[in-house]
Image (cartoon, helix red, strand yellow):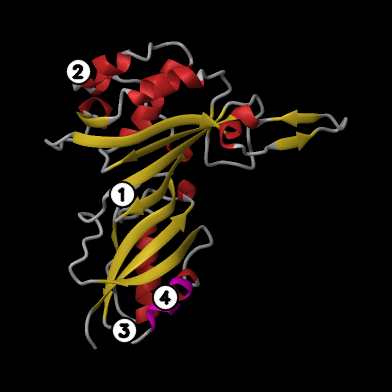
Amino acid sequence: MALRNIKLTITYDGTRYHGWQIQPGKRTIQAELVNAVSELLGWRTNVTGASRTDAGVSALGQVALIQIDSPIPTKNFAKAITDRLPADIAVTEAVDVPMGFNVIGDAECKLYRYTIFTGRARPVLVHQCWHLPEKLDIPLMNQAAQLLLGKKDFKSFAAADDHRTDSVRTILRCDVYSSCDKNTKYEIRTTNDEIRNTNDDWIFIDVEGDKFLYNMVRNIVGTLVEVGVGRMKPEKIIEIIEAKDRRAAGPIAPPEGLCLMWIKY
């Protein structure tokens, strides 16, 4: 049969995994997918991902590519692969793409969302968040976030061990908002029937860009939180960018709150 290119859209809870990329002796998302696809087809099949999410990071819209010469209809692949995966990973879509399709190079932009819970009680049922029981100034954080927009050298927001010479990236959007800003209702009825609105306890940071450096979004979030708690002025962002030094930015945010929402081609 003729070789086929199939693009997979994948969702996963990254809490129990050491990131996307295959690593010897460690459980990863890519390794689980390779095993599932290989079991389905009867021979080892490579799975190439569009984004190398870190350990603990989740995804709702990761994209991967497989090349096969199997007669299995494309429409059956999502369910067939998912049936062979752990419960915290699923393939939501499988579509044919041209043989020249580059799952990494053809991506136009990506959206990452970071979730922070600022309520006093630890959210034991929602583990994909950073529990930070402090009051955050969202308007100030947004003021700082807008200074990140555009094509800039984001070396200060890259991991210290990211040695890529090209650290210029384009941030298309960076928004900080609470649940109530998006008209979302979160209510908890207490034992004395009092309704307590918890909208402001959930804060989200959306970062959309053409591509990202290693740990870039988590370092941006950590820096914006420094602004939100009053330890840093919004205009400090300009100095951080100009410094091109990781030590100039704020601390890295925990991985659990980060989720890759989608990748556009």
Circle 4: element type: helix
In this picture, residue 3 sits left or right of residue 91:
left
Q: Is residue 27 among what the camera can see?
A: no
Read off the residue under disc 1.
52
Q: Is residue 235 left or right of residue 60?
A: left
Q: Earlier in the sequence, mark 3 or mark 4?
A: 3
Let me know if residue 84 is in the magenta part: no
Amino acid carrying label 1: it is Arg
Q: Earlier in the sequence, mark 4 or mark 1?
A: 1
Q: Residues within 10 Å of mark 1 (few under 14, many from 20)?
A: some
In magenta, the rendered stretch is 73-79
Of the numbered discs 3 and 2, the one sitting upstream in the chain is 3
Identify the residue shown where x is 46% and y is 76%.
80
Frontmost of labels 4 and 1 is 4
* Structural distance between the alpha carbons of marks 3 and 2: 52 Å
| Distance (Cα) linking label 1 and label 3 | 27 Å
Viewer-side label of 2, 1: 2
Q: Amino acid at mark 4?
A: Phe
SS assignment at label 3 = loop
Residue 33 against residue 18 in the figure, above or below: below
